[in-house]
Image (cartoon, helix red, strand yellow):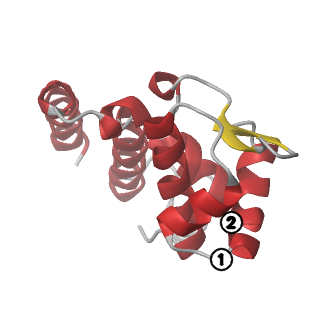
Amino acid sequence: MRINTSTHYAIRVMLYLAEQKRIVPSAELAEHIAISQRYLMQISAKLRDGRLIGTTVGMSGGYALLKDPSLISAYDVVALMEGVADIPGSAADIPDGSKLYNALSLLRDYVETYLRSIRLDRLTDKNMAEWQEEFADIVETHIAALRQNV
């Protein structure tokens, strides 16, 4: 999986807004994540249209999260910016129900589950041990499923 530059910046925007817990002026946000205000406007428009952030105009305007950081996952940002991951190849290339198709489906589900498990509140938290333990359990479950299907 490759995450494009816009998605990388979108995640950085979301993390900064989660950490600040306030309306952040565009100049501050652009400076903090080291991008131009024009590029920030493009990224923030997509995040706004996806209902992840809100924008306000005026002297005290800027950007803020529309939801609590515990309700926003990395998957939400990646899926909005990149689109939803799908199994590579066409139905003619990989027959539905084949072992390869099943393995690729599990891989796709694994990546999605992983990204959904990374919530913004945990990324801004200094102690991620709890999340890492929970995710280790998820990984074990997926590996067991993969071994059964391959």
Residue at 55%, 54% (x, y): give it: 13
Do tag 2 and tag 1 residues touch (Cβ < 8 Å)? Answer: yes
Q: Amino acid at mark 1?
A: Ser
- Residue for point 78% across, 43% down: 61
The one of 131 and 120 positioned closer to us in this rendering: 120
Q: Looking at the picture, does residue 19 appear above or below residue 42?
A: above
Q: Which residue is mark 1?
A: 36
Q: Viewed as shown, does residue 12 lie left or right of 124?
A: right
| Total residue callouts | 2
Question: Which is more toward the observer, 12 or 100?
Answer: 12
Is any atom of residue 81 visible in this view?
yes
Q: Residue at x 49, y 28 (%)?
A: 69
Residue 145, x across and y down, in percent: 23, 34
In the drawing, what numbered circle is on residue 40? Answer: 2
* Location of residue 148 (image quadrant): top left
Identify the element where label 1 is drawn: loop
* Along the viewing direction, whichever of 9 and 86 lies nearer the viewer: 9
Amino acid type assigned to the residue bearing label 2 in the image: Leu
**Residue 55 quadrant:** top right
Residue at the right extreme of this rendering = 58
Which numbered disc covers residue 134?
Answer: none
Tell me residue 106's x, y (percent).
35, 45
Q: Position of residue 115 (x, y in %)?
A: 40, 43
Q: Quadrant of the N terminus?
A: bottom left
Image height check: is 13 above or below 61? below
SS of the residue at dot 2?
Answer: helix
